[in-house]
Amino acid sequence: MADFKVELFLKFEAEVAESPAWHPEHQALYWIDMHKHSFNRLATGTGTNTEWKLPVMPGSFVFRENGALISCRDGIYDFDFTSERFEKRIDPPYDSSIYRFNDGKCDRQGRLWVGTQPLELSDLGTRKAALYRYDGNRIDQVMEIDMANGLAFTADGRTMYRAETARREIFVYDFDGETGTPSNARILAQWSRGTGGAPDGATVDTEGGYWVALPAGETGGAIGRFTPDGTLDIRIDVPVPGPSMVAFGGPEMSTLYITTAQFPQLAGRPGSELSGSFFKVETGFRGVPEPVFRG
Protein backbone atom coordinates (compact mmCIF):
# COMPACT_ATOMS: atom_id res chain seq x y z
CA MET A 1 0.00 0.00 0.00
CA ALA A 2 1.15 3.52 -0.76
CA ASP A 3 2.39 5.87 1.91
CA PHE A 4 0.19 8.81 2.87
CA LYS A 5 1.09 11.84 4.94
CA VAL A 6 -1.42 12.53 7.71
CA GLU A 7 -1.17 16.16 8.82
CA LEU A 8 -2.43 17.77 12.00
CA PHE A 9 -5.00 20.24 10.72
CA LEU A 10 -6.12 21.73 14.03
CA LYS A 11 -5.02 20.88 17.56
CA PHE A 12 -8.25 20.77 19.50
CA GLU A 13 -9.75 19.26 22.64
CA ALA A 14 -12.99 17.83 21.34
CA GLU A 15 -14.26 15.07 23.59
CA VAL A 16 -15.95 13.00 20.90
CA ALA A 17 -15.79 14.81 17.54
CA GLU A 18 -18.15 13.07 15.11
CA SER A 19 -20.26 13.38 11.96
CA PRO A 20 -18.00 15.72 9.93
CA ALA A 21 -19.58 16.98 6.70
CA TRP A 22 -18.28 19.48 4.18
CA HIS A 23 -20.52 22.39 3.18
CA PRO A 24 -19.46 23.46 -0.35
CA GLU A 25 -21.16 26.87 -0.21
CA HIS A 26 -19.73 27.77 3.20
CA GLN A 27 -16.37 26.12 2.47
CA ALA A 28 -16.44 24.82 6.03
CA LEU A 29 -16.50 21.52 7.89
CA TYR A 30 -19.49 21.08 10.18
CA TRP A 31 -19.28 18.54 13.01
CA ILE A 32 -20.67 17.63 16.43
CA ASP A 33 -19.08 16.97 19.80
CA MET A 34 -21.31 14.30 21.30
CA HIS A 35 -20.33 14.57 24.94
CA LYS A 36 -20.04 18.36 24.95
CA HIS A 37 -23.52 18.59 23.37
CA SER A 38 -22.45 20.95 20.61
CA PHE A 39 -22.92 21.56 16.89
CA ASN A 40 -19.90 23.21 15.25
CA ARG A 41 -18.63 24.93 12.12
CA LEU A 42 -14.90 24.74 11.42
CA ALA A 43 -13.70 27.30 8.87
CA THR A 44 -10.87 25.37 7.26
CA GLY A 45 -9.32 28.48 5.75
CA THR A 46 -8.70 30.10 9.14
CA GLY A 47 -9.03 27.20 11.57
CA THR A 48 -11.75 29.13 13.44
CA ASN A 49 -14.40 27.02 15.13
CA THR A 50 -17.90 28.28 15.93
CA GLU A 51 -19.89 26.34 18.53
CA TRP A 52 -23.63 26.17 19.19
CA LYS A 53 -24.73 24.38 22.36
CA LEU A 54 -27.46 21.75 22.15
CA PRO A 55 -29.79 20.90 25.04
CA VAL A 56 -29.03 17.18 24.80
CA MET A 57 -26.49 14.71 23.37
CA PRO A 58 -26.34 14.68 19.55
CA GLY A 59 -25.46 11.58 17.54
CA SER A 60 -25.19 12.89 13.97
CA PHE A 61 -26.57 15.49 11.57
CA VAL A 62 -27.37 16.11 7.91
CA PHE A 63 -27.70 19.34 5.99
CA ARG A 64 -31.01 20.80 4.84
CA GLU A 65 -31.51 23.98 2.82
CA ASN A 66 -29.98 26.78 4.91
CA GLY A 67 -29.70 24.57 7.96
CA ALA A 68 -29.29 21.12 9.42
CA LEU A 69 -31.23 18.29 11.03
CA ILE A 70 -29.50 16.99 14.15
CA SER A 71 -30.40 13.57 15.52
CA CYS A 72 -30.21 13.76 19.31
CA ARG A 73 -31.00 11.45 22.20
CA ASP A 74 -34.50 12.89 22.70
CA GLY A 75 -35.43 13.45 19.05
CA ILE A 76 -34.52 15.19 15.82
CA TYR A 77 -33.82 18.92 15.98
CA ASP A 78 -33.86 21.53 13.24
CA PHE A 79 -31.08 24.13 13.18
CA ASP A 80 -31.42 27.26 11.05
CA PHE A 81 -28.20 28.86 9.80
CA THR A 82 -29.78 32.33 9.71
CA SER A 83 -31.44 32.48 13.13
CA GLU A 84 -28.89 30.09 14.72
CA ARG A 85 -31.70 28.50 16.71
CA PHE A 86 -32.62 24.89 17.47
CA GLU A 87 -36.19 23.59 17.35
CA LYS A 88 -37.28 20.02 17.97
CA ARG A 89 -38.87 18.53 14.88
CA ILE A 90 -39.88 15.03 15.97
CA ASP A 91 -39.71 12.91 19.13
CA PRO A 92 -37.64 9.71 19.08
CA PRO A 93 -39.30 6.39 18.15
CA TYR A 94 -37.69 4.67 21.15
CA ASP A 95 -37.26 4.90 24.91
CA SER A 96 -34.62 7.61 25.40
CA SER A 97 -33.77 6.23 28.84
CA ILE A 98 -32.40 3.13 27.06
CA TYR A 99 -31.35 4.25 23.56
CA ARG A 100 -29.98 7.23 21.69
CA PHE A 101 -29.52 8.18 18.04
CA ASN A 102 -26.02 7.61 16.68
CA ASP A 103 -24.81 7.56 13.07
CA GLY A 104 -26.94 9.05 10.29
CA LYS A 105 -26.76 10.08 6.61
CA CYS A 106 -29.08 11.13 3.80
CA ASP A 107 -29.58 8.89 0.81
CA ARG A 108 -29.21 10.46 -2.65
CA GLN A 109 -32.94 11.19 -2.74
CA GLY A 110 -32.73 13.28 0.43
CA ARG A 111 -34.27 10.94 3.00
CA LEU A 112 -32.63 10.77 6.42
CA TRP A 113 -31.31 7.39 7.57
CA VAL A 114 -30.35 7.29 11.23
CA GLY A 115 -29.75 4.45 13.63
CA THR A 116 -29.62 3.93 17.35
CA GLN A 117 -27.49 2.24 19.94
CA PRO A 118 -28.02 1.37 23.61
CA LEU A 119 -26.89 4.06 26.04
CA GLU A 120 -24.91 1.47 27.95
CA LEU A 121 -22.12 -0.07 25.86
CA SER A 122 -22.39 -3.19 28.00
CA ASP A 123 -25.82 -3.74 26.37
CA LEU A 124 -24.37 -4.02 22.86
CA GLY A 125 -25.26 -7.37 21.37
CA THR A 126 -27.90 -8.17 24.00
CA ARG A 127 -30.25 -5.19 23.61
CA LYS A 128 -31.08 -4.71 19.92
CA ALA A 129 -31.11 -1.26 18.30
CA ALA A 130 -32.65 -0.17 14.98
CA LEU A 131 -32.06 1.70 11.73
CA TYR A 132 -34.76 4.24 10.81
CA ARG A 133 -35.77 6.13 7.66
CA TYR A 134 -37.26 9.63 7.99
CA ASP A 135 -38.87 11.40 5.01
CA GLY A 136 -40.06 14.51 6.84
CA ASN A 137 -43.53 13.14 7.56
CA ARG A 138 -42.95 9.82 9.29
CA ILE A 139 -40.10 7.85 10.76
CA ASP A 140 -40.09 4.11 10.02
CA GLN A 141 -37.96 1.30 11.40
CA VAL A 142 -36.27 -0.46 8.50
CA MET A 143 -34.14 -3.08 10.22
CA GLU A 144 -32.94 -4.35 13.57
CA ILE A 145 -29.22 -3.81 14.28
CA ASP A 146 -26.80 -3.85 17.19
CA MET A 147 -25.26 -0.37 16.72
CA ALA A 148 -25.54 2.28 14.01
CA ASN A 149 -22.24 3.23 12.40
CA GLY A 150 -20.53 3.50 9.03
CA LEU A 151 -23.60 4.65 7.07
CA ALA A 152 -22.83 5.72 3.50
CA PHE A 153 -24.46 5.72 0.06
CA THR A 154 -22.55 5.47 -3.21
CA ALA A 155 -22.59 8.37 -5.66
CA ASP A 156 -25.10 6.62 -7.94
CA GLY A 157 -27.37 5.92 -4.96
CA ARG A 158 -27.62 2.22 -5.74
CA THR A 159 -25.58 0.88 -2.82
CA MET A 160 -25.84 1.40 0.94
CA TYR A 161 -23.18 0.57 3.53
CA ARG A 162 -23.36 0.24 7.29
CA ALA A 163 -21.04 -1.13 9.98
CA GLU A 164 -21.38 -3.09 13.19
CA THR A 165 -18.58 -1.64 15.27
CA ALA A 166 -18.35 -4.16 18.10
CA ARG A 167 -18.57 -7.13 15.72
CA ARG A 168 -16.02 -5.62 13.29
CA GLU A 169 -18.32 -6.17 10.32
CA ILE A 170 -19.20 -3.97 7.33
CA PHE A 171 -22.45 -4.72 5.47
CA VAL A 172 -23.39 -3.74 1.93
CA TYR A 173 -26.90 -3.60 0.42
CA ASP A 174 -28.48 -3.04 -2.95
CA PHE A 175 -30.51 0.15 -2.62
CA ASP A 176 -33.74 1.10 -4.39
CA GLY A 177 -33.72 4.88 -4.46
CA GLU A 178 -37.32 5.18 -5.60
CA THR A 179 -38.76 3.32 -2.63
CA GLY A 180 -35.89 3.85 -0.18
CA THR A 181 -35.46 0.11 0.35
CA PRO A 182 -32.18 -1.75 1.02
CA SER A 183 -32.04 -5.42 0.03
CA ASN A 184 -29.67 -8.32 -0.61
CA ALA A 185 -27.67 -7.79 2.59
CA ARG A 186 -24.18 -9.28 2.55
CA ILE A 187 -20.94 -8.78 4.42
CA LEU A 188 -18.42 -6.59 2.63
CA ALA A 189 -15.68 -7.24 5.16
CA GLN A 190 -15.19 -8.74 8.61
CA TRP A 191 -12.19 -9.37 10.78
CA SER A 192 -11.24 -10.58 14.23
CA ARG A 193 -10.30 -8.39 17.18
CA GLY A 194 -6.62 -9.14 16.69
CA THR A 195 -6.37 -7.89 13.10
CA GLY A 196 -7.43 -4.25 13.11
CA GLY A 197 -9.57 -1.52 14.59
CA ALA A 198 -13.33 -1.37 14.87
CA PRO A 199 -15.27 0.27 11.98
CA ASP A 200 -16.76 3.64 12.93
CA GLY A 201 -17.83 6.62 10.77
CA ALA A 202 -17.48 6.40 7.00
CA THR A 203 -17.80 8.08 3.61
CA VAL A 204 -17.37 7.18 -0.07
CA ASP A 205 -15.30 8.43 -3.00
CA THR A 206 -16.24 8.95 -6.65
CA GLU A 207 -14.64 5.63 -7.65
CA GLY A 208 -16.83 3.57 -5.34
CA GLY A 209 -14.36 3.23 -2.48
CA TYR A 210 -15.65 3.06 1.09
CA TRP A 211 -13.49 4.98 3.60
CA VAL A 212 -13.94 4.19 7.28
CA ALA A 213 -12.35 5.24 10.57
CA LEU A 214 -10.80 2.32 12.47
CA PRO A 215 -10.31 3.24 16.14
CA ALA A 216 -9.11 0.88 18.84
CA GLY A 217 -6.61 -1.01 16.72
CA GLU A 218 -3.91 -3.13 18.29
CA THR A 219 -1.24 -0.64 17.14
CA GLY A 220 -3.40 2.50 17.29
CA GLY A 221 -5.99 4.15 15.07
CA ALA A 222 -6.20 4.02 11.30
CA ILE A 223 -8.29 4.85 8.24
CA GLY A 224 -9.19 2.10 5.78
CA ARG A 225 -10.46 2.15 2.19
CA PHE A 226 -12.43 -0.86 0.96
CA THR A 227 -13.11 -1.52 -2.70
CA PRO A 228 -16.59 -2.68 -3.79
CA ASP A 229 -15.43 -6.31 -3.65
CA GLY A 230 -14.37 -5.96 -0.01
CA THR A 231 -10.62 -5.61 -0.53
CA LEU A 232 -8.81 -3.36 1.94
CA ASP A 233 -6.61 -1.60 -0.60
CA ILE A 234 -5.53 1.36 1.57
CA ARG A 235 -4.78 1.57 5.28
CA ILE A 236 -3.50 4.83 6.75
CA ASP A 237 -2.23 4.98 10.32
CA VAL A 238 -3.17 8.06 12.34
CA PRO A 239 -1.29 9.38 15.41
CA VAL A 240 -4.19 8.90 17.85
CA PRO A 241 -5.99 5.74 19.01
CA GLY A 242 -9.47 7.14 18.37
CA PRO A 243 -10.21 8.36 14.83
CA SER A 244 -14.01 8.61 14.78
CA MET A 245 -15.08 9.52 11.24
CA VAL A 246 -13.86 10.79 7.89
CA ALA A 247 -15.22 13.27 5.34
CA PHE A 248 -13.93 14.56 2.02
CA GLY A 249 -13.85 18.32 1.64
CA GLY A 250 -12.01 21.30 0.23
CA PRO A 251 -12.63 23.16 -3.05
CA GLU A 252 -12.00 20.01 -5.10
CA MET A 253 -13.44 17.55 -2.54
CA SER A 254 -9.98 15.99 -2.49
CA THR A 255 -8.93 16.45 1.14
CA LEU A 256 -9.90 13.71 3.58
CA TYR A 257 -10.61 15.24 6.99
CA ILE A 258 -10.43 13.03 10.08
CA THR A 259 -12.22 13.73 13.37
CA THR A 260 -10.96 12.09 16.54
CA ALA A 261 -12.17 11.35 20.04
CA GLN A 262 -10.88 10.90 23.55
CA PHE A 263 -12.20 7.47 24.44
CA PRO A 264 -9.36 5.42 25.94
CA GLN A 265 -11.91 3.08 27.49
CA LEU A 266 -12.73 1.88 23.97
CA ALA A 267 -9.18 1.90 22.67
CA GLY A 268 -7.93 0.06 25.75
CA ARG A 269 -5.00 2.43 26.16
CA PRO A 270 -4.41 6.05 27.18
CA GLY A 271 -5.29 8.66 24.60
CA SER A 272 -2.70 10.77 22.81
CA GLU A 273 -2.20 14.45 23.63
CA LEU A 274 -3.61 15.02 20.13
CA SER A 275 -6.80 13.05 20.79
CA GLY A 276 -9.76 15.30 20.01
CA SER A 277 -7.84 17.12 17.26
CA PHE A 278 -8.53 17.27 13.52
CA PHE A 279 -6.30 15.76 10.87
CA LYS A 280 -6.23 15.77 7.08
CA VAL A 281 -4.63 13.72 4.34
CA GLU A 282 -4.42 14.00 0.57
CA THR A 283 -5.29 10.58 -0.84
CA GLY A 284 -5.48 11.15 -4.60
CA PHE A 285 -9.23 10.43 -4.50
CA ARG A 286 -12.23 12.75 -4.53
CA GLY A 287 -15.29 12.58 -2.37
CA VAL A 288 -18.98 12.97 -3.09
CA PRO A 289 -20.87 15.93 -1.52
CA GLU A 290 -23.34 14.81 1.13
CA PRO A 291 -26.99 15.01 -0.01
CA VAL A 292 -29.28 17.64 1.50
CA PHE A 293 -32.39 16.53 3.40
CA ARG A 294 -35.45 17.16 1.22
CA GLY A 295 -38.25 16.04 3.48
Image (tube, rainbow, N blue to C red):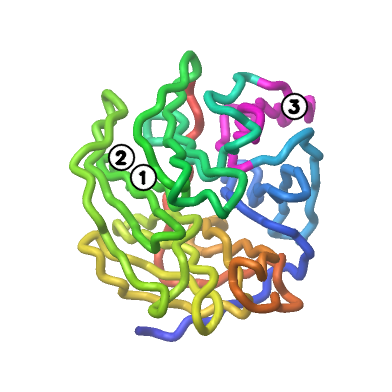
User: Percent x, y for residue 266?
Assistant: 60, 66
Disc 1 crowd rating (10 Å Cα; few below 14, some 14-19, many 20+) is: many
Residue drawn at 58 percent across, 25 percent down: 92
Q: Quadrant of residue 210?
A: bottom left
Q: What's under tag 2, amino acid-wise? A: Gly
Residue span colored magenta: 59-88
What residue did someone put label 2 on? Answer: 157
Q: Residues within 10 Å of mark 2 (few under 14, many from 20)?
A: some
Quarter location, residue 96: top right
Task: Report if residue 68 is visible in the image.
Answer: no
The residue at 31%/72% (across/down) is 232
* Dominant secondary structure of the residues highlighted in magenta in the image: strand
Q: Are marks 2 and 1 in contact (CB under 8 Å)?
A: yes
Vertical arrangement, residue 267 with respect to residue 73, above or below: below
Q: Which residue is mark 3?
A: 86
Residue 200 lies left or right of residue 276; in this view the side is left
> For this rendering, which residue is in front, 178 or 95?
95
Label located before the other in sequence (3 or 1): 3
Q: Is residue 232 left or right of residue 292?
A: left
Q: Quadrant of residue 1?
A: bottom left
Circle 1 sits in a helix, a strand or a loop, which is it? Answer: strand
Between the residue at mark 2 and the residue at mark 1, the CA separation in whole angstroms equals 6 Å
